[in-house]
């Protein structure tokens, strides 16, 4: 009788339920412990990014960083990260700008708000979309792959090999990639903003100088000193985040998780989060 009770499925189910109930507090404790460590990891990662950015800023201002070998690597990296991107990105933004300008102008005219159409185009495209699009484009095409390459070089010991040869890996490998990312983002954003403003004028007024006075007056009203300052700071911060975050992610990624995919994904997530924060702050500065 006792053996049948011990072998019954009800007893087995009861034991399983008791074990699950005993394990549940342990699961919650592990989750709480992990949640408690998360802010610490974020703070440590933020501090490493700030430290790396300060170190690279000092190197950028130091004349010794622009010796012949480093200068050649820097110029080559700036060229590779900027010139090949210009035709495709400019064409893409030109097409999108024409389409959005036409949509906004037609919509404003249908509601009798034609006088606000160009101002809406400038605020939506030039102030908000183009800097963010340029930053994401440079991140996906250049800086995030650079971060993955640096992570692979670190795993293979190539950075340590350079250091043993008397070559500073920060000045030879890191600094050119960061400077090129900053330069590429600012260049693409500035050039595309100018092209968008020209195309917006042509889409509304055509090939004539008749609307130039009203257009420049509206442009001056939109880009007042406060908005101009916010726009410049936002573009600069975008470029710094896009250039610095993937490199910091590559150098601070743990050895056990430093695959190329994880480095790219971590860099993309961190870049997108920081760009979103900067965009929200700029919106608050412009419209509140």
Image (cartoon, helix red, strand yellow):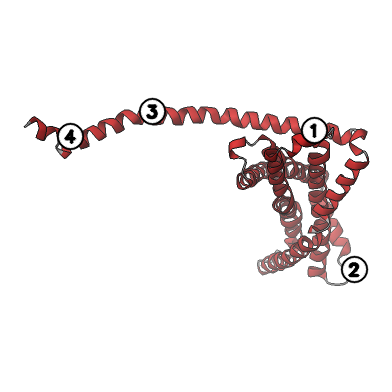
**Residue 258 percent location from the top left of the image:** 62, 40
Dot 1: element: helix
- Point out the frontmost of discs 4 and 3: 4
**Quadrant including the N terminus:** top left
Instruction: Judge whether 160 appears above or below 113 on screen.
Output: above
Residue ID for mark 1: 163
Dot 2: element: loop
**First along the sequence among labels 1 and 2:** 1
Q: Quadrant of residue 103?
A: bottom right
Q: Which mark is residue 209?
A: 2
Residue ID for mark 4: 11
Q: 101 and 6: which one is in front?
A: 6
Residue ID for mark 3: 26
CA gap between label 2 and label 3 equals 74 Å
Q: Residue at x 34, y 30 (%)?
A: 23
Within 10 Å of disc 4 (Cα), the crowding (few <14, some 14-19, many 20+) is few
The outermost residue toward the left is 1
Dot 4: element: helix
């Amino acid at each position: 009788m006792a053996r049948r009770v011990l072998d019954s499925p009800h007893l087995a189910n009861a034991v399983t339920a008791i074990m699950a109930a005993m394990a549940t507090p342990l699961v919650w404790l592990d989750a709480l412990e992990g949640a408690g460590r998360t802010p610490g990891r974020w703070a440590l990662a933020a501090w490493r990014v700030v430290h790396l950015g300060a170190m690279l800023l000092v190197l950028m201002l130091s004349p010794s960083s622009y010796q012949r070998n480093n200068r050649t690597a820097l110029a080559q990296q700036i060229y590779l990260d900027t010139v090949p991107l210009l035709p495709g990105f400019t064409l893409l933004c030109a097409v999108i700008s024409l389409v959005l300008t036409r949509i906004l102008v037609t919509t404003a005219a249908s509601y009798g708000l034609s006088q606000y159409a160009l101002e809406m185009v400038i605020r939506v495209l030039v102030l908000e979309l183009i800097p963010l699009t340029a930053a994401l484009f440079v991140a996906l095409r250049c800086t995030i792959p650079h971060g993955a390459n640096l992570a692979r070089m670190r795993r293979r010991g190539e950075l340590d090999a350079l250091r043993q040869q008397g070559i500073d890996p920060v000045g030879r490998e890191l600094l050119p990639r960061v400077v090129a990312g900053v330069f590429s983002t600012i260049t693409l954003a500035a050039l595309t903003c100018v092209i968008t403003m020209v195309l917006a004028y042509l889409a509304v007024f055509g090939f004539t100088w008749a609307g130039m006075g009203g257009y420049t007056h509206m442009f001056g009203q939109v880009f007042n000193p406060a908005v101009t300052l916010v726009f410049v700071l936002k573009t600069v911060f975008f470029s710094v985040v896009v250039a610095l975050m993937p490199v910091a992610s590559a150098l601070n990624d743990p050895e056990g998780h430093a695959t190329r995919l994880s480095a790219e994904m971590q860099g993309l997530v961190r870049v997108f989060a920081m760009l979103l924060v900067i965009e929200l702050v700029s919106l608050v500065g412009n419209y509140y």
